[in-house]
Amino acid sequence: MPSAALVTPSLETFLESIEAVKASDADDVDYSIQHLVSLLKRRQIRNSRSCAIATAHLLSLVVSKHQVTDIARLIKRVQEVGQKLTDAQPKELAVGNIVRRVLGVIRDEAEEDREGEESIHDEAEGESPLSPKEVEVSSIEQQARSAPSLTSRPLQHGAISSEDLSTSNERLPNTKDDTSSQNRALNLSPPLFAAGTSQPLLKSMFSLLSHPVSSSSTPTVTPGTQTPEDPPSHSIHALVGGSAARDLRAEVVEAIEEIIEELNTADDQIAGYALDHVHSNEIILTYTASVTVQKFLLKAAAKRKFTVIHAESYPNEHESVHATVTGSLKGNSSGTGPDRFHRSLTTAGITVILIPDSAVFALMSRVNKVILGTHAVLANGSLVAAAGSRSIAKAASMHKTPVVVLSAVYKLSPIYPFSNDALIEYGDTSKMFSNEDADLIEKVEVDNPLYDYVPSELIDLYITNL
Amino acid sequence: MAPNAARSTKAKQKLQDESREESLQAIVLADVFETRFKPFTFERPRCLLPLANTPLIEYTLDFLASAGVRDVFICCGQHADQVEEYINNSRWKLSSSPFQTLLLLKSPATSVGDVMRDLDGRDLITRDFLLVSGDVVSNIALESILDKHRARREMDKNAIMTMVLREFGLEHRIKSKRRKPIFVIDPKTERCLHYEEIGPKSVSSRYVGMDAKLLKEHGELEIRGDLVDCFIDICTPDVLGLWSDNFDYRTLRRSFLHGVLKDHELNGKTIYAAIASDQYAARVRDLKAYDVVSRNILGRCTYPLCPDSNLVSGQNYRFQEGNIYKEDGLSIARTSIVKQKVVLGRRTSIKDRSLIVNSTIGRSCQIGSDVHVSGSYIWDNVQIGDGTKIHRAVVASGARIGKNCSICPGTLISFGVYLADGTNVSGVHHIKPMRGKYQENNAQDEASQIDETTDAALQLSSSDDDSTASSLLGTSPSRPNSQSLTELSMSQFSESDSDFEPLPETSRRSSLRSDLSWESAPNRDFLVEATADILDALQNGVSPENISLELVSLRMKEDASQHQVRHAVVTAFMRRVSNLMGEDGQSGLSPNEAVTEVFTKNKEVIKRTLFDQSREAKDDQVDLLMLIQKDAAGRSRGESLLVFIAKELYDLELVEEDGIMQWWEDDRSKSGEMKKVRVLTEPLIDFLQNAEEESDDESEEDGDE
C-alpha cells in the first residue's frame, strides 16, 4: 500500500512547480500565478526575500511564456500579474519592488527596439513632453553620474510612485509615443547611499539596472556609457517583427535572471562592507534573527573580535533567535534559497549575549552600534521592521548610539507611509498568551503586530548591496 | 508506435506512483448529521453558514490546501445541491485550484457511518487519508504529525489512525459544556487507549469506566479532559474497512472510536493521538463554538486565516487597529462608533449614532440610526430599523428587523424573517418563517406589509403567499397562540441555553426547562424511532442480528436505557403481531400462529435485551413481561395474546420459570386492567408451578439415590 506524504507548500515547492511549468509545453502560467497568490495569502511565502525570489521567478515565467510579440501587451501583462500579486499581499512590499524592476527592464529593452521606429514617430515624441517629475528624475540621475563616489544621500526612489504599476495602464494605448519618456523615469538607478561603495561594482550595477540606450547598432545588451542628456540616436536599425520581440523576451528573461542572482548574493555583498563598520572590541546590539545581519557580523568576526548583544524578539521570532544564537538553526526554514549560513557567531569566537527585549534600554549605554535588519525601507527612509525595532532605535537615539540598517536594494520601496494600518501586519495573537489563559482574549484586547514603523530620524546609516 | 505507447504509459504509471507517494487524500464531511445549528440548517447546510463573513467550508478547504493535500472528496448529506452549487462556483474548481481532484459525493446517508461505508464501497480511497469535518478551522501544520503517523505505520500495520487533538486550558470556552470527551492516553507512545464522553448533568455519567487491564499493561496513563477534539484524523484505508465491518457504527467518536478501542483485544487495531499545544484548531460544533471561533478569528488567533487575508476571491477586507476589518463600499456615519473586533462586509451602511461592538456584519446590510449591535452575528442583506438594540443574537441573511425592536441574548433569527416595529424578543427564541422556504424575490413584495400590521407581537411571515404569510404569532411564552413557536423552541431550549449563554436571569429560568428536556426529549425520540425501525425491519424480514445491531447503535446514539430498548421491542413486536392477525382479528393468522411467527424468528432480538439469566432476581424478564402485559391490555384479544406470548417466551427459553413466577407475583401485574388481561394465563402459571414442583421432586429423588 503506498504511503502518503504531505508536502507543505513553501517557496521550495513553488520554485519546483515553476521549473516544471517552464520545462513543459503547457501554458500553465495562470496556474502558477494563482499558486503564488494563494501562497502569499496563506503566508506560506513570507519575508521580503522569499517574496522577492518567488516574484522574480514567476515574472520570468510569465515573460518567457508570453505568446504575443507586442511589447505594450507584454508590459500590460506584467502589470496585471504584478497587480494581482500586490493585491494578494499588500504588506509584502518586496513583491511590488520586484515587479517595478522587471517592468523597468522590459521598458529598457523596448527602448532599444523602438529606436528604429522612433525616427518615424519623431514628431510624436514632441507631443508628450516630459512631466516635471520625470525631468526631476533625470536631473537626479545626472547628479548620480557626476558624483560616482556616492556618499549618503536621501532616498530618491520615491520619485517612481506606484503609479507605474497602476495608472500607466491607461497610458498604454499610446505607449509608442510615450514609453520612451517613461523609460527615462525608470532608468533611474536605485538609490545608492552606502558609504565606501567600490567603483567596479557600481558600474556593473548600472548596467544591470539601467540598460542604456546604446548608440551601438547591436540589439544585444551592452553596457555602455549613456548620460541622460544624450539624445536618443535615431539613425540605426529598425528592429520590427516577431524575431526581434522574441529576442527581446529572451533578453528580458536574462535580465530577470540577473535580478534573481542579485537577490541571492545581496546578503554577501552587504557583508562585504562589514569590516568598514564593525571594529575591534565594539559592543554591537542586534535584534531578530535576520540572515543579512548574521552574515554581516560573521564576516566581521573573521578578522575582528567584538561582542554581540542579541535581543530575543519575543514573541514572534524568539525561537529563531535562540536557534541562531545557539547555532542550531538549520539552513533556513522559510527557504531563502541557497543559504550557506550554518555557523553561529559563537563558533566564530564572538561573545554573544542573549537578552530579553526589555533590557535593551538598560544596556544601551554600553553599546557602540546598533545593527538592524529590516522588512522594507520606505520612500522617506523610514523602516518597516520587526516589531520592537522602534523602541530599540529610540533607545539608541537617546544614547546617541549609531543605528545602522542593513537593507538590500529589493527592500527599498517607493511607498510613502501615509497610514500605519496599510503597512503593518498583525500576526497570531495566540503567541501572546498560554493555553491556560486563552480566555483572556475575551476580556482583553490582544494585539500582536509583526512590524514596527521606524521613522528615518532614528536611523543613522543604511547599507545596501550596491 | 507500439513500444513508444507502452513506454509512455509506463512513464505515466511511474508518474502516478510518484504522485501517489506524495499526496494525501482528504475526506471532508460536509454534513456531520447533527442538528446543532437549527433553525439555520433548515435552509442552508452547516458548512455554508458564514463565519466571519466567509462560509465555513472555505476554512476547512484552506486548511487542507495549506497542508498540501491534493485530492479532496466532499461528502454531502443534507442540502447537497447547495453545497455542489457553491463548490462549482468557487475558486476550488478553477484550473488554478491547488486540488488535483475535488469530488462531491452525494449519498442518502443518515449518519457518518453510512457515509464511511458508502466511501468504502466506492474504492476511491487508496492510501492514507485525512478525515476532517466540514466545519474545521485550523492552521495546524500537519507535516510532523503525519511523519509520526507514517513511522508508526511502518512499524505496525495496525496503527490505523492518528487523531489531532488541541490542548486548551481546562475551562476554555471552546469546549462543549454538554459532553466532555475523555481521552485516556499513554503519553510514551501517544496511543489512545480509551475514549468516553461524560455528560455534565447526571452524576452517573461522571465516571469513566476503563478496562483494568489497561492499568496493568501501561506504566503511565494520562486521563485527559482538557483536549479539544477537532475532528482531524489521519486514517489508513483500513479505517473504512472497519466501518464496513461494524455497520452499527454511526458516529465518529462515540461509536467508532469507542468501539475500536474497546475491541482492541479482538482486532488489535491501535489509534494514536497527536496533541498540539500551539497553533489553532477548533470545530464549529455548535453555536457556542461558533461564537468563540468567530472571536478567535477576529482576534487573529487563527492567523493567517483572518478576514484581511482575503482568502476567498472577491473579498477585500482591510485591517484596522482594534481588530476591525472593513471591506470597501462601506458607508459609515461619522457619529457612529465601530469598535473591538468587528467585521463589516461590502456595501453595508451604518447610520448616525449607531454603535457596533464585537460583531460580525455581512454584506449589503442596512443599519439605521441609534442602533446598538453588540456580540451579534448579522449575516448578509439584513435591514435593521432605527433605534433597535441587538445583543448576542444571530440574524440570518435577508432578515428585516423593524424600528425600536429589542432582541435579547440567545435569539436566533432565521433566513428572511421580518420583525415588526417595536417587537421585543425576550428570552431565548428561535424565530423562523412559518413554512416554506425563504425566497429572496418574494421578500421584496412583502416588505410593505409589515408596517401596516404592526402589533406588539412578533410577525413571522413565510413568503409563499400573502394569505398564509402573515400569520401573527405572539412570542411571549404566556400567550396561548404561540404554540407552534414555543413547541419549536422547547426542544431547542436546552441547546441554545448551553450554547449561547444568555443573561444570568434568563439562564436560570430556562436551564430548569432544559434539564427537563434533557432527560425526556431524546428518550421519547428513541422510543418512537426505535419502534418504527424495528417494525420496519420485521415487515421487511430483516435478519434478527441486524435488527439488534441497529437497536444497539440507536441506543448508543440516544443514550437510552435497557428498559426503553425493551419497551421499543415489545411495542414493535406487538404491533407486528396484531398486524399479522389482521385488522379485525379474523382475517389474518390466529394469535398462536402470529406470535410464533414473530417471536420465534426474532428471538435473538429479545434475548439481547435480557441480561439476568444468571441472576436470582429476574428484573429484566419481569420488566419484559410487564411491558407485554401492559401492551396486551390495550389490544383486542389481549388475553389470548398474552398467554401465547408467555408460553412462547418460555418455550424459547427467553424467559425462565423464575422470571415468569416473579412477574406473576409482582404487585404491578395484579392491579386493575392488568389483572383482567392475565386471566387466561393462569393455567400456564399453574402448569409451571406444578412442573417446578415435579422437577424439584425429581431432583430430590436424584439426590436420594
Image (cartoon, coloured by chain):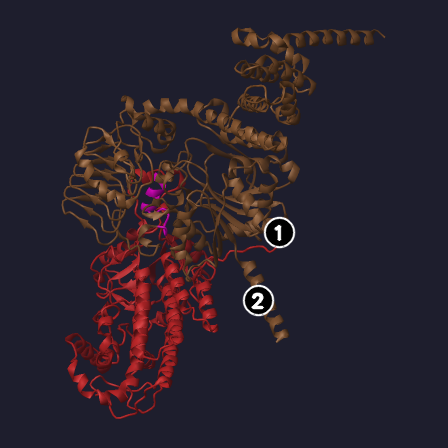
Chain colours: A red, B brown
SS for tag 1?
helix
Q: Which kind of residue does numbered mark 2 sit on?
A: Lys
The residue segment tinted magenta is B291-305
Q: Quadrant of residue B426?
A: top left
Residue at point 63%, 35% (across, down): B217
Kindly identify which numbered label has been placed on residue B154.
1
Q: Earlier in the sequence, mark 1 or mark 2?
A: 2
Name the residue at the front extreme: B587
Horizontally, residue A376 falls left or right of residue A62, namely left
Q: Is residue A134 above or below residue B56?
A: below
Between residue B135 and residue B34, name the one nearer to us. Answer: B34
**Marks 1 and 2: CB-CB under 8 Å?**
no
Q: Is residue B338 shown in magenta?
A: no
Mark 2 is surrounded, within 10 Å at the Cα level, by few (under 14), some (14 to 19) or many (20 or more) other residues, namely few
Near mark 1 (Cα within 10 A), the count class, few <14, some 14-19 or many ≥20, is few
The circle on residue B12 is 2
Q: Say whether residue B637 is visible.
A: yes
Q: In the rendered image of this protein, does residue B69 appear above or below residue B622? A: below
Which quadrant, please, contains the C terminus of chain A? bottom left
Residue A46 in view (yes/no): no
To which quarter of the image does residue B576 belong?
top right
Q: Is residue B296 magenta?
A: yes
Q: Secondary structure at mark 2?
A: helix
Nearer the camera: disc 1 or disc 2: 2
For mark 2, name the chain: B
* Residue under disc 1 on the same chain as residue under disc 2: yes
Front residue of B274/B647: it is: B647
Residue B431 appears at what percent x and percent y?
30, 33
